[in-house]
Amino acid sequence: MSCTKLPFRCHEASVRIRLMLFPQLLKSRLSRLATSFVVTFSLLSASPAHAQRVNVVRDAEIEALVADYVRPILKVAGLNRSGIEVVLVNDNSFNAFVAGRRIFVHAGALLQSESPNEIIGVLAHEVAHLAGGHQHRLREQLARAQTMAVVAMLVGVGAGVAGAATGSEGFGRAATGLAMGGTEMARRSLLGYQRTEEITADRAAVDYLNKTKQSGRGMLKTFDRMGRDLALAGVRIDPYQVSHPMPRDRIANLEELVRKSPYFETKDPAGLQLRHDLMRGKLAAYTAGPAAARRIFKDPSSIGMQYADAISTYLSGNPRDALAKIDRLIASQPKNPYFHEMRGEILIKANRPQDAAKAFGQAVKLAPSSGLLQVGYGQALLATGDEAQISKAVSELSAGLTREREYVNGYRFLAQAHGRLGNIGAAELASAEERYYSGNYQEARVFAARAQTKLKRGSPEWVRAQDIINSKPQGR
Ligand SMILES: [Zn+2]
């Protein structure tokens, strides 16, 4: 799917990560939801020769939901004021990890979690790694994850090796073990490595869940599944399994802790489960199509299935039917901003930009703090071609970008809007920002210099252009 056809969401992304962490990333079909997110991994960029582009998902609905999942956990972990953000990675495998001040969650982990509690448990465990300062080790684990997966395959089984394999020390021992010709040797030498860190994180995670009055049952279910899958030869190994050893005694310890909790039987609030279902429906529709959604939602009348169906219909190029379907959902939940957002996207596809702008305007009204929705609104206003609407587009796009400074698509629309209004200096500055946040610093400086010749010397815009001109390439 080309990016120009889906300007709302799609953009070639560039998070630079050292080493081949996720070989399957670029093959993911989630590109329709994917967008750019330039991250300089100061922790991970030691070896630029191994830098790799990966895709990040930007979606207002999913981001808001995951933020709601992680916020209470961060609070009880004492990290709520430390500017930690969650980044959704465009990858269908199960994984979650921390790097710097970011928690990375694969779309696959969200899609595979049947309840909020399952993914919240994983997030709690990752927050515990952050709070415990484990990220240095984890980085090492991730850097070697793929190598270790290969080792696991070489030895044929994987259970012990992949399950416990992490870190340079562990890798060294694995290599020794293999050189000595024994799977069992490798397995034994690796088991136990970093067990303390994982057990510490499990304990802290259960503590966070107790403090937020949530059950640890979902975490147990997920970890138990990870442990079992690894025990079966030939089963695909998710990156999370490689970076998180799940030996039986660890699961047993966790189970004991989780069952002791007074909140063991506590269920997710119905409203949260509903949002979770909608998220899974959306992800299924974008990543795997309607058949995948039908496998998730056994009941065809469930709202998650209806949402997946509406989105699939839209994606299959049938905006008229998609509109009827999304309108039924809006009738059932008139205050859901993301249904209105989807309606806007469908109307854009139906070549009805005026109506699309109205739908996006409604979405923004219902979720006024979402920068992504504001950018969507701005883009729909721009598409009307009407001068007054384009002026409004400039203010919506600018406001959205104040909240989402690194949202590259937004700058592209802003440049177009300024261009249409004849503000060439501002248009070139927006293009400079777009290049800058895409990691294309050389072009960014060219655009910034061009913008400066048209901007008032010393104005905030001129100063920003100067900042871009002076910027040092990051992470290279
Ligand atoms: Zn862990």
Image (spheres, grey):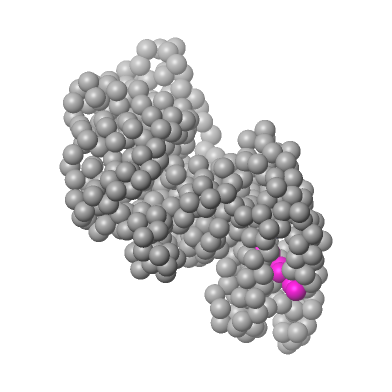
Residue 68 image point, x, y percent: 57, 42
Res. 169 in view: no
Residue 245 appears in which quarter of the rendering?
Answer: bottom right
Residue at (79%, 65%) from the top-left corner?
Answer: 256
Quadrant placement of the N terminus = bottom left
Q: State the predominant SS element of the stretch in magenta.
A: loop
Residue 1 in the figure: left or right of residue 156:
left
The relative height of residue 424 versus residue 148 in the rendered view (above or below) is above
* Residue plotted at (64% across, 49% down): 99
Q: Can the viewer see residue 246 in this picture?
A: yes
* Residue 151, quarter of the rendered image: bottom right
What are the residue bounds of the magenta stretch?
A: 243-248
> Looking at the image, which residue sits at the far bottom?
181
Identified at 39% across, 26% down, the residue is 398
Q: What percent of the width, then of the height, locates residue 403?
A: 48, 30
The percent coordinates of residue 134 (x first, y second) are: 74, 52
Identify which residue is drawn at 61% across, 75% down. 229
Q: 397 or 41, which is in the foreground?
A: 397
- Considering depth in this image, is 181 or 306 the residue closer to the camera? 306
Q: How many marks?
A: 0
Q: Is residue 204 magenta?
A: no
